[in-house]
């Protein structure tokens, strides 16, 4: 049972435009969410997080939105740059546990 | 400030053998988690160590075991290797959970690529 789903395996965006990566979850007990970026042959790099008490968190070009009623979060990258081309993972954690559940990732390609 | 370091970076083992992977956490971190990432999948939680004890375990068999040392570094051991154990093994470190610090971010190392033949 995949509790965290990233239904788009890949996404292509023109440089300078907005990239929107989506993530859905099924467990209503999740209360903390993370986004990671992963380049080939490297470990995942932390991008941005959001707690369930918020609906938006912003850090530079990256903004994460959380819609608890829809059990949906999204990562917006504005403006997109070629260096943003990577695989993006969302992850969720439930209060009282110590593990993160990851989605299967979305491969973003930013075209110059 | 050193990040999470893992060794070895790549290794090849034969079915039935045993392997030990090593991890040093990010400076200031006291908690180490291990994840397995198969090709085309997201990382899957193996277990977490804090204060030299396994605090939580994912859905992995007992062939997977670990250890945390007093300096917070950690080892992941896998016995009786199977072909399906071939994956990227990621170590992640963080500050301790459960002390009013809900939602601690975990930071990953580069990973150890294990190939079982």
Image (cartoon, rainbow, N blue to C red):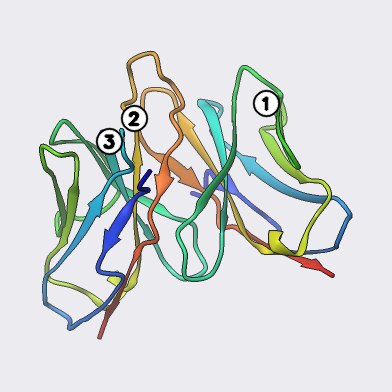
- Give the distance between the C-alpha atoms of the residues marked 2 and 3, in whole angstroms: 6 Å
Q: Give percent across and percent down for residue B101.
A: 41, 19
Which residue does the numbered mark 2 point to in the structure image?
A: B95
Q: Quadrant of residue A48?
A: top right
Please state if A33 lies on the left or on the right of B13 as rendered: right
Nearest to the observer: residue B64 or residue A59: A59
Residue at 37%, 48% in the rendered image: B3
Whether residue B58 is visible to the viewer of this picture, yes or no, is no
Under circle 3, the secondary element is strand
Whether pointer 2 and pointer 3 mark residues with C-beta atoms closer than 8 Å, the reply is yes
Which residue does the numbered mark 3 point to in the structure image?
A: B31
- Give the distance between the C-alpha atoms of the residues marked 3 and 1, in whole angstroms: 29 Å
Q: Residue furthest front?
A: B1
Residue at 20%, 55% in the rendered image: B61
- Give the distance between the C-alpha atoms of the residues marked 1 and 2, in whole angstroms: 26 Å
Which residue does the numbered mark 1 point to in the structure image?
A: A68
Q: Give percent across and percent down for residue A90.
A: 58, 46
Mark 3 vs mark 1: in front: 3
Q: Residue furthest bottom?
A: B117
* Mark toward the start of the polypeptide (2 vs 3): 3
Nearest to the observer: residue A17 or residue B17: A17
Under circle 2, the secondary element is loop
Q: Chain of mark 2?
A: B
Mark 1 vs mark 2: in front: 2
Under circle 1, the secondary element is loop
């Amino acid at each position: 049972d995949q509790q965290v789903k990233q239904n788009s395996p890949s996404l292509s965006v023109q440089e300078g435009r907005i990239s929107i990566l989506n993530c859905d979850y099924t467990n209503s007990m999740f209360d903390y969410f993370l986004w990671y970026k992963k380049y080939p042959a490297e470990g995942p790099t932390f991008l941005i997080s959001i707690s369930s008490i918020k609906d938006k968190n912003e850090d530079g070009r990256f903004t994460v939105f959380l819609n608890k009623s829809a059990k949906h979060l999204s990562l917006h990258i504005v403006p997109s740059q070629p260096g943003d081309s990577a695989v993006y993972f969302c992850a969720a954690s439930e209060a009282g546990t110590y593990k993160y559940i990851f989605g299967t990732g979305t491969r973003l390609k930013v075209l110059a | 400030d050193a990040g999470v370091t893992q060794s070895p970076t790549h290794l090849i083992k034969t079915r039935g053998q045993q392997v030990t992977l090593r991890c040093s956490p990010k400076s200031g971190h006291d908690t180490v988690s291990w994840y397995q990432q198969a090709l085309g999948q997201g990382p899957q939680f193996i277990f977490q160590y804090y204060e030299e004890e396994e605090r939580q375990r994912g859905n992995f068999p007992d062939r997977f075991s670990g250890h945390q040392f007093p300096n917070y570094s950690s080892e992941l051991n896998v016995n009786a290797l199977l072909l399906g154990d071939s994956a990227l093994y990621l170590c992640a470190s963080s500050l301790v959970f459960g002390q009013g610090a809900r939602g601690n971010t975990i930071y990953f190392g580069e990973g150890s690529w294990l190939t079982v033949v």
